[in-house]
Image: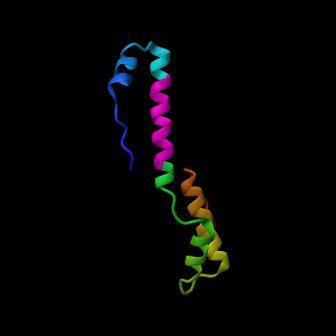
Amino acid sequence: MKIYELNRKTYKDVKKMDHGQMSDFCRGIYQSGYEAGKKAAEGLSEDDIRRIILEVKGIGEKKAEDIVLALKAAQNGRGVLTDV
């Protein structure tokens, strides 16, 4: 993991920034951290998950698909309505 180091030149540049420049600077740091976190959080693909779920005794194609859809909905930040 790469840790952001504030060097002397950047420190001096930050001290001279106006509000807009500082906002852009912070946005850039945030965006690079977000992208690094997103990359670090990559895991199993949808097909991998489906294949693993189908290996569980008693889980068929339909139930596996329901589980995959529920996981996708949860990942996108919204709940899933079911017909239970």
Taking the magenta stretch, the answer to whether it contains residue 27 is: yes
**Spot occupied by residue 59 in the image (x, y as percentages of width and height):** 58, 82
Name which residue lies at 63% across and 70% down.
47
**Image quarter of residue 69:** bottom right
Identify the residue at horizontal 59%, vertical 65% (top origin): 45
Q: Is residue 84 visible?
A: no
Q: Is residue 19 visible?
A: yes
Of all residues, the one furthest to the front in this rendering is 9
On the rendered image, what quadrant is the C terminus found in? Answer: bottom right
Choose between 60 and 16: the one closer to the eye. 16
46 left or right of 11?
Answer: right
Q: Position of residue 78 (x, y in %)?
A: 57, 51
Most foreground residue, 46 or 20: 20
Vertical position of residue 82 compared to residue 78: above or below: below
Q: Residue 39, how many percent across, how many down? A: 51, 52
First to last magenta residue range: 24-37
Residue 4 lies in quadrant: top left
